[in-house]
Amino acid sequence: GYDMAVGSRFIGNDSNFKSTQVRRIGINMLSFLIKILTGKKIKDTTSGYRAVNKKIIEKFAFDYVLEYPEPITNLQVIEDGYKVKEVSVGMRERKFGKSSITFYKSIYYMLNVGLTMIIFGVGGRKDGI
């Protein structure tokens, strides 16, 4: 009965995943922004582990955000009235390599994504707010 399922690292007991405090603050800020703009809480806003139905695939087949798409498309799907569910998934910390998101990239990410979500969110609201 859902149009999109988001695999969440932060709900349920399936995951022992630990992220950095800075990353958690950013994810919580984006989660709060989605909640303010849509009324729906998504805890793992940056999860790319998602499953969607045909309607969502058709929605984004030719128009999909290329830079940091997860939080923005979560917002768009919710605002368009699709049913979204967050499900618990088990994820492990990486054993090799390191994140491409540096401190400065994380600041850029938050400004870019946050402003984009506000523009999409406020512009897309039915009540004109």
Image: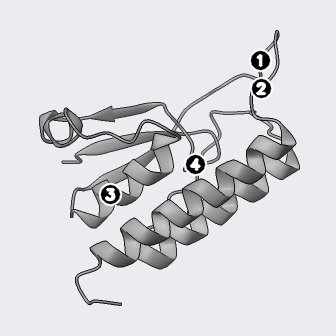
**Residue to which mark 2 is pinned:** 99
Quickly name the residue at label 3. Answer: 76
- Disc 1 target residue: 94
The relative height of residue 62 versus residue 40 in the rendered view (above or below) is above
- Quadrant assignment, res 64: top left
Q: Estimate the x, y position of residue 22 in percent, counting from the top left.
A: 84, 51
- Label 3 and label 1: CA atoms lie apart by 30 Å
Vertical placement of 48 versus 84: above or below? above
Type of the residue with mark 1: Arg
Quadrant occupied by the C terminus = bottom left
Instruction: Tell me the element at label 3.
Output: helix
- Amino acid type at circle 2 is Ser
- Residue at 75% from the left image edge and 46% from the top image edge: 106
Q: Earlier in the sequence, mark 2 or mark 4?
A: 4
The tag earlier along the polypeptide, 3 or 1, is 3
- Mark 3: amino acid: Gln
Dot 4 amino acid type = Asp
Badge 1 local density, few (<14 within 10 Å), some, or many (20+)?
few
Task: Say which of 47 and 120 sits in front.
Answer: 120
Label 2 Cα crowd, 10 Å radius (few <14 / some 14-19 / many 20+): few
Name the N-terminal-most of marks 4 and 3. 4
Image spot of residue 40 (x, y percent) = 42, 68
Marks 2 and 1: CB-CB under 8 Å? yes
Precedes in sequence: disc 1 or disc 4:
4
Q: Residue at x 38, y 78 (%)?
A: 122
Q: Which SS class for mark 1?
A: loop
Please state which of the two labelled residues, at mark 3 or mark 1, is closer to the viewer: 3
Q: Which mark is residue 105?
A: none
**Closer to the camera: disc 2 or disc 1?**
2
